[in-house]
Image: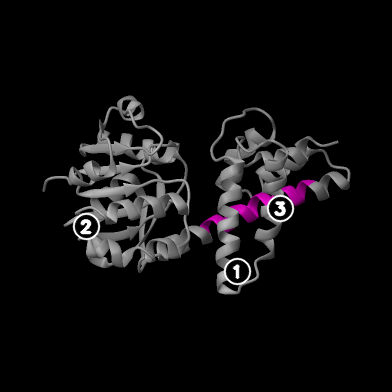
Amino acid sequence: MNKERVGIVGLGRMGGAMATRLAQRGFAVIGWSRSDAFGARQRALGIDAVEDLSSLAERSDVIILALIDDQAVHDVLNTLAATDLTGKLIVDTSTVSPMTLRSHQEAIGRSGAALLDAPIAGGPEMLLQGKVGLYIGGSPEDHERFRPVAETLSDRALHVGKLGDGASAKLVNNMMLMGLWQNLKEALLLGKSAGLSSAKILEILAGSPAASPAMKSRLPVISGETDTVGFPVSGAVKDARLVRDFAEELGISIPSISASLASFEAALAAGYGAADLATMVKLVADAD
């Protein structure tokens, strides 16, 4: 069976990694970025460029969105809904509210396309290796159509339910990670107050049952051995606010996320927005 043509909207770190991974595995990939009207990013990635969204839709079978926030997704879907999308499948991999895609389902359907949400758990390096998680929400038929692309990108592509449920699953996943960094910060605060050094606390925790792969991967950042950015503080603030706002809509109290958000916002205010999210913990480790 011939592979479907894939158009990627948003060619940042995640969209670029998706384009590279899919092109390397034989998919015809077309790209468009709202911030790159002249195609420099597409040329750097070795994929075809188009001038606008309607051209991308015309030349694609599956259209993947990899955008920064809810407003960007709203803007792109509003533009796409005004074009002929007959037979297209639109898949949003952005981290957004579960209500975002649901609010466009009717309009996109009238234009002839189907919608899936499939947010990604993992960073661009993992995506290039096909080792990320994909949490897919939408109809079984649309999920089945997307499966060849999903399984090229992910070794953990899970169909979790109806449209929007993928976004809910991603927020749950992110909550656990946000709580991890807040707990590590508080563990350092407690341990240092009790007279332990930051280095000794991190050594203890790195070998303990509490040590997760995420924590271990960021220890070089916390100890100052590297300033590599896996995911920036600014992104952590955006995602934590998204979780907070969705919890408020549902009437649920999530105090650990409130504490985590406050910590990330403090790091952002201190000028570390572009630094890796583990910098929030590093600031405590470095403090006298």
Left or right position of 165 against 265: left
Residue 182, magenta (yes or no) = yes
Residue span colored magenta: 173-188
Point out the residue furthest to the front here.
Answer: 82
Which residue is depicted at the point 21% across and 39% down?
A: 27
Identify the image's colour scheme: rainbow, by chain, secondary structure or one colour: one colour
How many residues crowd around disc 1 within 10 Å: few (fewer than 14), some, or many (20 or more)? Answer: few
Q: Earlier in the sequence, mark 3 or mark 2?
A: 2
Q: Which mark is residue 262?
A: 3
Q: Main secondary structure of the magenta part?
A: helix
Q: Residue at x 61, y 49 (%)?
A: 237
Q: In the drawing, does residue 229 fall left or right of residue 261?
A: left
Residue to which mark 2 is pinned: 145
Q: Earlier in the sequence, mark 2 or mark 1?
A: 2
Report which quarter residue 232 is drawn in: top right
- 277 to 238, vertically: above or below: above
| Amino acid type, label 3 | Ala
Q: Could you tell me which secondary element the residue under label 3 belongs to?
A: helix
Residue under label 1, please give it: 248
